[in-house]
Image (tube, grey):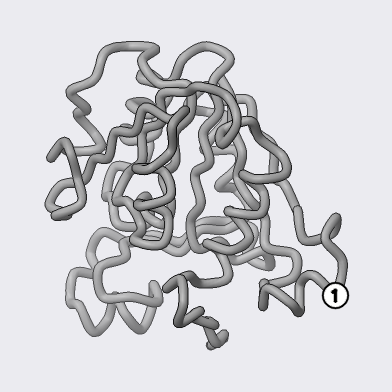
Amino acid sequence: EKVRENVLSPSTLSLERHRLLWLYLQHKTDLLTQPQKLLHFAPEQCFYKLFKESNTIEYTTTDLNSPLADVLADICKLPFADNEFDFILCNHVLEHIPDDYKALQEIYRVLKPGGTAILQIPLENDREETFEDDSITDSKERARIFGQYDHVRVYGMDYFKRLEKAGFTVNAVDYTKELGAKQIDRYRLAANELIPVVSK
């Protein structure tokens, strides 16, 4: 079994994946510069304030039970209109959702045509096929097999096919390649981490 250390920044409470995403949002998207309606699932503390205080972002947060959520909702049955959001962030949520395909269909539905979504999950780059088994319900077994007690699958590289099946145009972005070794070390990033960037 592989165990990789996560590096938490004490000042921002960010993990590698958060820092990588923030750099990508800053340098490769117009989310932080153009007026947009942003939907953020299970909002992470390290991003929440930044988006909330933005003058250009119309920010909506949603979750089943997070105190940071504006809208308490089930990701598989969202209370939003079709084509409502310009940008959607859903990071490390889908591995908790038994019917992730239904969740992806809902994200696709509420994303505007031409809109962008970033749908990060714990991805094992060296695993071809996603592993899931509904019969595993014991929390200790789930932690041992899926990496966390409340995860229901381990995603492999076929995750990108799942995204396509839901209708998205998919781009597996290895932004660390552009950053180079010095930046990877400076921000304590995980080299070769893929960012699933999709559009409608």
Mark 1 neighbour class, 10 Å CA radius: few under 14, some 14 to 19, many 20 or more: few
What residue is drawn where x is 37% and y is 56%? 95
Q: Is residue 96 above or below residue 37?
A: below
Q: Tell me where residue 160 sits by quadrant.
A: top right
Depth order, front residue of 97/84: 84
Q: Position of residue 166 (x, y in %)?
A: 47, 27
SS state under label 1: helix
Q: Which residue sits at x=62%, y=44%?
A: 25
99, above or below 120, in the image = above
Residue type marked 1: Lys
Q: Where, quadrant-wise, is the C terminus in this rendering?
A: top right
Name which quarter of the figure residue 196 lies in.
Answer: top right
Where does residue 92 sit, x and y in percent of width and height?
Answer: 41, 57
Q: Does residue 112 sit above or below 38 in this rendering?
A: above
> Residue at 64% of width from left, 58% of height from top?
128
Give the left or right position of residue 129, taking residue 145 as reference: right
Residue tagged 1: 182
The residue nearer to you, when weighing 56 against 198, is: 56
- Residue in view at x 21 percent, y 45 percent: 63
Percent from the top left, x then y, of residue 98? Answer: 27, 49
What x and y, as percent, mark residue 99?
29, 42
Q: Which quadrant of the view contains residue 161? A: top right
Image height of 1 relative to 136, above or below: below
